[in-house]
Image (spheres, coloured by chain):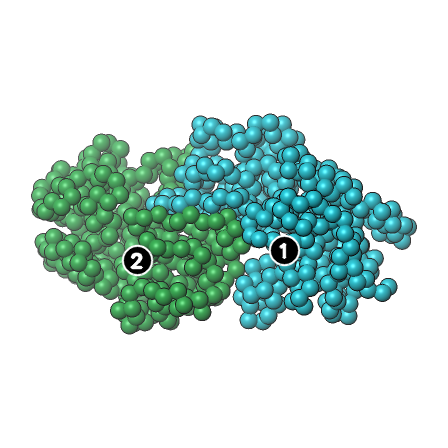
Chain colours: A cyan, B green
């Protein structure tokens, strides 16, 4: 199959500009490239923040980063996936890979301090732009592309490459297990994965939200209990309760002294949330006296992604994923902005769903 | 030996008030009480902050909390020490011990959220005041009193019960070992123990200080290198270097973004310092992208103190401890306030040093 030089995708040319389906130049190949036809792409809060230029000035045009696909072509040094494989890529699509890099040399490429590349809103080392996956095709580095286990559909798999690993990796890294009691703050796209993973790891899970309308769905997702955080007195009875709190959403009035008493000794507060406000000052006395570990987690490393895929396959992950046809991406974005996701939207390229159905006869698992 | 009802000690009756040697009422006994004749008491920065009412309004009169002594009497339920033992007590001298306490029930009494008692500036459950160890006697709860290993003198042992365990416990808890690279921020009483412990644990150790006059003594203490923190460019070459940073001193202009890049993946920033200013806000993006664990550590639990005593004995801890006779406590405090400690002052009750010399013939180790 000859290598394509262009692709079609939804692009955003500026803050508040309407999204457009356009033909774009695909990045040039190198020895590590994988080509894929996109079947599914998640719609992540990061996409919206980036399109809206909430964090830094983005590189327009741009589009999504939670891609599930079918592999259509590989370059000479690609060994981990082959043509016909169902494969995926998430937020990160490159790092420096240098022997002297403290992150890359230790399997922590997600923390590479030298050269991080992302699936969109980024520039490849060759100078080409990376545009992302609200598209029909994507080309990128095999070292950040993963084969999807047979039991996971592309629809489910696409989102684990970002929201999935962003919540799985820190829970695993911080040893969540059957002895853990995990509070999940916020019940949106990330929080919903937090509940699913922590339950699958055997933990007792409490959903914490200021929006009491989420009470029922939290329990439906498997949470053992729901804590309304809109009144401090709801929290005080959980003093000394949690081994971990996974923060996927906070209010601007968040106070450390409200949350640190909720931990068991040596508890871990893990932030995976990127609001537009900062975590507040903390007094050294509170930091010392609480002995709570405060940390964040940056998506996940390739090793953690592989581990997550196996765990998701083994535990039969069942997220809540309303779908939209790829051609309705602008409507999906509008609905996202209206707060409608319960809990994560997937853009499906229906043409490729048909194409892929042909592969089934060849033994591929359903997508 | 009949139980004493009073003791003599140096007391402080208010901020800026002169210290006085006075007779005071000793707390009433209960089944867990241990009486001790104080031989050595460390002079800790906390003593000064407390006398100066820098943190909260203190319970005057008060005096020190790093006590080494000889046991003179025990009550009915005391099993861990006996009359004639060389024993010590540190900052904490009580907790709730309830089965339902998430801290006490798991061997983390230092984090008891229900009922913490301290060696001075505190009230015992019976309502009596706790006055501390710039004194000739002290009486307290055996569950926070420890037998000093034979190889450690009382002079060395007294300070490990506070400054020692405050630095040992977090380094041990966060797995400092021969593969670790530890930055020790600040070189005062705590920082000097940080260097000694981390080196004894096999780590590579870098002292970080804004005061370049400490360069030579840092190396003399065993640090592998010295980093002047008074210029940002001195730090940048240590990007990705540290597995741990033990913070024993920071400036009011401390910035997270200066220090988070210095860590290896999943590094740990441990604060054991109690300045009068807060740690600043941290952006969620920096918390996420750095994946650094930020924590504090509250002295240490009884289990950690026992562990530390054995480690100190095994590794032959050699701190720098200028001594003052107990009768010169006011001068020691004045010298402390003048920034003279290199690195920790010990008040010695010379009378008891003589008394204890008699015990030597009976097989007691030297004090």
Q: Is residue B271 visible?
A: yes
Picture disc at residue B190: 2
Instruction: Please report, as a chain letter, where disc 2 is located.
Output: B
Residue sitting nearer the eye, B39 or B293: B293
Percent x, y of residue B363: 21, 60
- Name above or below for residue B189 compared with residue B224: above
Residue nearer the viewer, B235 or B91? B235
Q: Quadrant of residue A2?
A: bottom right
Question: Are discs 2 and 1 both within one chain?
Answer: no
Q: Within 10 Å of the Cα at label 1, are there few (<14), some (14-19), or many (20+) other Cα atoms?
A: some
Q: Residue B82 carries which label?
A: none
**SS of the residue at dot 1?**
loop
Instruction: Determine the residue positioned at 10% across, 47% down.
Output: B18
Q: Where is residue A36 in the image (x, y as percent from the top left)?
A: 78, 57
Q: Position of residue B350 (x, y in %)?
A: 11, 57
| Residue A59: assigned label | 1
């Amino acid at each position: 199959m000859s290598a394509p030089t262009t692709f079609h995708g939804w692009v955003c040319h500026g803050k508040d500009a309407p999204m457009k389906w356009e033909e774009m130049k695909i990045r040039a190949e190198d020895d590590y490239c994988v080509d894929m036809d996109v079947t599914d792409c998640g719609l992540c809060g990061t996409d919206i923040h980036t399109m809206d230029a909430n964090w830094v000035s983005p590189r327009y045009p741009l589009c999504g980063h939670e891609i599930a696909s079918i592999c259509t072509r590989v370059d000479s040094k690609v060994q981990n996936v082959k043509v016909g494989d169902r494969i995926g890529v998430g937020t990160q699509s490159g790092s420096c890979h240098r022997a002297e890099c403290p992150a890359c040399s230790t399997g922590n490429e997600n923390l590479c301090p030298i050269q991080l590349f992302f699936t969109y809103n980024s520039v490849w080392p060759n100078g080409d732009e990376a545009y992302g996956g609200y598209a029909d095709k994507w080309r990128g580095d095999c070292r950040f592309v993963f084969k999807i286990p047979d039991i996971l559909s592309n629809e489910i798999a696409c989102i684990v490459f970002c929201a999935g690993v962003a919540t799985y990796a820190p829970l695993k890294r911080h040893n969540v297990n059957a002895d853990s009691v995990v509070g999940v703050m916020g019940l949106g796209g990330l929080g919903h994965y937090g509940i699913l993973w922590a339950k699958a790891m055997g933990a007792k899970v409490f959903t914490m939200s200021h929006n009491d309308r989420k009470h029922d769905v939290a329990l439906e997702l498997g949470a053992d209990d729901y804590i309304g955080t809109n009144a401090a007195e709801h929290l005080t009875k959980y003093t000394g309760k949690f081994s971990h709190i996974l923060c996927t959403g906070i209010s601007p009035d968040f106070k450390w002294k409200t949350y640190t008493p909720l931990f068991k000794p040596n508890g871990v507060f893990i932030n995976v949330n990127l609001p537009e406000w900062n975590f507040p000052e903390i007094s050294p006395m509170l930091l010392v006296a609480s002995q709570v570990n405060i940390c964040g987690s940056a998506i996940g490393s390739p090793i953690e992604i592989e581990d997550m895929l196996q765990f998701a396959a083994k535990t039969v992950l069942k997220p809540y994923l309303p779908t939209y046809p790829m051609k309705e991406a602008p409507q999906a974005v509008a609905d996202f902005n209206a707060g409608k996701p319960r809990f994560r939207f997937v853009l499906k390229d229906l043409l490729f769903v048909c194409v892929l159905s042909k592969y089934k006869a060849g033994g591929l698992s359903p997508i």
